[in-house]
Image (cartoon, rainbow, N blue to C red):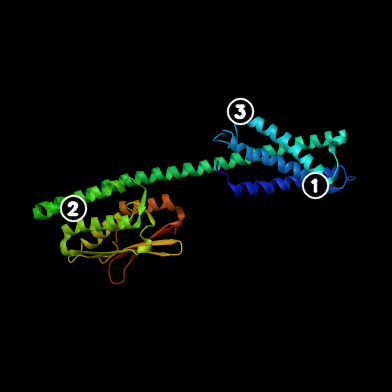
Amino acid sequence: MRIDWITKLRDLFQVLAFCLAISALQYAFSPERPYEIGLVYSLLIGIATWAIIDFGRHFFPSSAETGWPTGLWGLALIFLGMVGGFLLGILGSDSWFGWSTWSSGNALRYSILINLLASASAGYYFYSTTKRSVLERQMVEERQHANEARLKLLETQLEPHMLFNTLANLRALIASDAARATDMLDRLIAYLRATLAASRQTSHSLSDEFDRLRDYLELMTVRMGPRLRYALELAPELARLPVPTLLLQPLVENSIQHGLEPKVEGGAITVCARRAGAVLTLEVIDTGVGLPADTNARTGFGLTQVRERLAATFGEQATIDLSPVASGGTRVTLSYPSAA
């Protein structure tokens, strides 16, 4: 049995406020009676009734929609709470003041009527608030499932795109250098084997992401030779932070395809991670030809995938920025909140 004590404490304060309102109402109708009497009886009856019902419901099968016991169990619990809370509250209050309520029939009937009305109102209120909180929690869970499904869809689109680009590079290499093409094919098989398990998840650690980037860049090095140089900078304290799988892959592909390959002498790619407070920043920097004038290239498949995956996972808290490097090349910066 799992109890949310924060919610219980909040409900207790609401019960106390409700009891204070009842005691004030009683005093308004019977100003000749001391206010303290109505206050003590209202507090003890209300707290006892709430405790029996709200704690007792955890011992019965509850509806997934409302969080309350279903059928006769729910009615029996409310009846038990009203009767038991009234009796315990009366006994406690009588002990407090040193008299017996049972000696006054009119007062007893009056107290029973007030308790029934108050218990029915309070019971309906807490039933409604509990049902609302359960529905809100279900909405959050459904939204999370929808986001996970969307990420899976984006990922299934990304994997064939990466494989198509790699095979296209392999085909171009076969005609010019069969030995290097064979080496590239062997590395491709190893890369796909290593990424198969990770690609079935929606997230993995930064160290796993950088390992996959290293495998991919080694694969591209076979084709480009010394024209491609790279550096992966990941501090040990950031290695276990979660990141969506293959998040940086399309950015590295773009750097090679649009930045380094059009440049005769090639260039370098640097991928680095840093964190400032709760914000994680990832950068992909290349020394290629720079940002293309064609705006379509800046909003191509890879960048669109990255934007959509960040939006599906982190919403408006995530940002992506493209900027030119002063010495030549392009910098892509991703920022999103990351747990410690």
Q: Nearer the viewer, mark 2 or mark 3?
A: 3
Rendered image: mark on residue 39: 1
Q: Nearer the viewer, mark 2 or mark 1?
A: 1
Alpha carbon distance from label 3 to label 1:
34 Å
Q: Secondary structure beneath disc 2?
A: helix
Three-letter amino acid code at the position of disc 2: Arg
| Contact, mark 2 vs mark 3 (Cβ under 8 Å) | no
User: What residue appears at the point 69 percent right and 36 percent down from the top-left corner?
Assistant: 81
- Name the residue beneath numbered marker 2: 187
**Side (left or right) of 180 relative to 260:** left
**Side (left or right) of 137 relative to 11:** left
| Picture quarter with the N terminus | top right
Q: Position of residue 312 (x, y in %)?
A: 42, 49
Foreground pick, 30 / 324: 30
Three-letter amino acid code at the position of disc 3: Gly
User: Can you say whether 258 is above or below 85 in the image?
Assistant: below
**Side (left or right) of 17 relative to 207:** right
Alpha carbon distance from label 2 to label 1:
79 Å
Q: Residues within 10 Å of mark 2 (few under 14, many from 20)?
A: some
Q: Position of residue 111 (x, y in %)?
A: 81, 37
Q: Secondary structure beneath disc 1?
A: helix
Rendered image: mark on residue 71: 3
Q: To which quarter of the image does residue 264 belong?
A: bottom left
Q: Secondary structure beneath disc 3?
A: helix
The answer to whether residue 25 is visible is no
User: What residue appears at the point 38 percent right and 51 percent down from the top-left corner?
Assistant: 309
Q: Residues within 10 Å of mark 3 (few under 14, many from 20)?
A: few
